[in-house]
Image: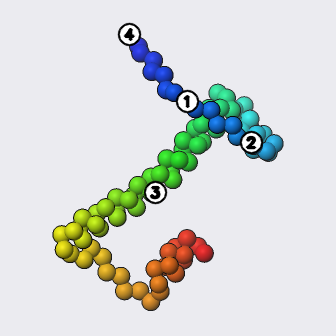
Amino acid sequence: MQFAYRVSLGVVPVRLDDEMLKRIDLLVQQKHYKSRNEAIRQMLKSKLSEELSEDEDVHELVESLLRIKKKGKDPLVLRLKKTAVETVAEGRGR
């Protein structure tokens, strides 16, 4: 016996320009996806997963550093010639 679980899906109206629609349609025609909806849903899922995994990595690191700090130890000491803001901006390519 096989069970089918239904997931509640919300509806989000999105406006896309003609070029984006043509590119999505091309992916559907090439059999990468069954429909525009599936294509857009899978691309959003992939991007959200990528973005959130980066945030989760940082979150885990911060939690780890805070646990070390609670034990009365210095978790990390940076001795930089630049300020933290300059270092972060440089890492972001600004």
User: Mark on residue 1?
Assistant: 4
Foreground: disc 2 or disc 3: 2
User: Mark on residue 54?
Assistant: 3
Task: Report the residue at 58% width, 38% height from top.
Answer: 42
- Residue pointed to by mark 2: 15
Q: Is residue 33 visible?
A: no
Say what amino acid the circle numbered 4 marks: Met
The residue nearer to you, when weighing 23 against 94, is 94
**Alpha carbons under labels 1 and 4: distance apart:** 25 Å
Task: Report the residue at 51% width, 53% height from top.
Answer: 51
Q: Position of residue 4 (x, y in %)?
A: 45, 18
Dot 2 or dot 3, earlier in sequence: 2
The N terminus - image quarter: top left
Above or below, 25 against 87 in this view is above
**Alpha carbons under labels 2 and 3: distance apart:** 27 Å
Q: Position of residue 36 (x, y in %)?
A: 68, 32
Task: Report the residue at 50% width, 79% height from top.
Answer: 85
Q: Quadrant of residue 71?
A: bottom left
Dot 2 or dot 4, earlier in sequence: 4
Left or right relative to 31: residue 67: left
Q: Quadrant of residue 9?
A: top right
